[in-house]
Amino acid sequence: MVDGSGRGRPRSESARAAVLHAVDDLLVEVGYAALTMKGIAERAGVGRQTVYRWWSHKAEILYEASVLDAQHELAVRHSGDAGKDVEAYLGALVTFLTRSHAGAAYRALIGEAQHDPEVAALLGSRDVLSDSAAEVVEAARSATAATLSTEHATALLIGPPFFQALTGRTAEHIDTKTLAEQFLHALRAS
């Protein structure tokens, strides 16, 4: 039988979930450099063959886990008020980047991508943060009649908290209210 990727038997959802949960926990405990496929399999309680059947390397597992968690953690309920929605999204983004295991995985992959072309290609295959911000950005662009492209507006929204989180600031030191106001001001000025 073949799973959706064409690589062998279908996935056992419980084994898949165990691997995806294990990779986040193990990353936080041992760091990216010490993370191994063997360690992930052992933590998940599955055989290494099971892990290798579905993923080629640890970055793929970490990325899949991060994407799934990001979809959940970065989803915000839309109120219809662009300012409130932008601030809520920024709060979720800062929490994701500074406190979440999935955010730690994402940051580890960003670091690894700086010198590993395979990891860079993996991250380039799907922009998790832009995807998560799409609805908030479009609503803000409409509310402000912005002429900035969606891509530029998204970079203005995500860039400042992303930079601050990657340079070691904690959630308490990132002012999402001010960042939201600055973002909306930049959109109005465009």
Image: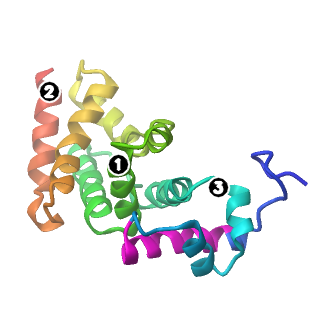
Please tell me whether mark 1 sits on a helix, a strand or a loop: helix
What is the spatial separation of the Cα atoms under label 1 and label 3, in whole angstroms?
A: 19 Å
Residue 76: in sight, yes or no? no
Numbered badge on residue 110: 1
Q: Marks 2 and 1: in contact by CB < 8 Å?
A: no
Q: Which residues are magenta?
A: 16-31
The amino acid on which the numbered mark 2 sits, given as a three-letter code, is Arg
Q: Residue at x 28, y 29 (%)?
A: 141
Would you name the residue on which mark 2 appears? Answer: 188
* Residue 17 is one of the magenta-drawn residues: yes
| Number of marks in picture | 3
Q: How many neighbours does mark 2 have within 10 angstroms: few (below 14), some (14-19), or many (20 or more)? A: some
Q: Amino acid at mark 3?
A: Trp
* Residue 42 showing in the rendered view: yes
Label whose residue precedes the other's in the sequence (3 or 2): 3
Residue sitting at the far right: 1
Q: Of the residues shown, which amino acid type is indicated by label 1?
A: Ile
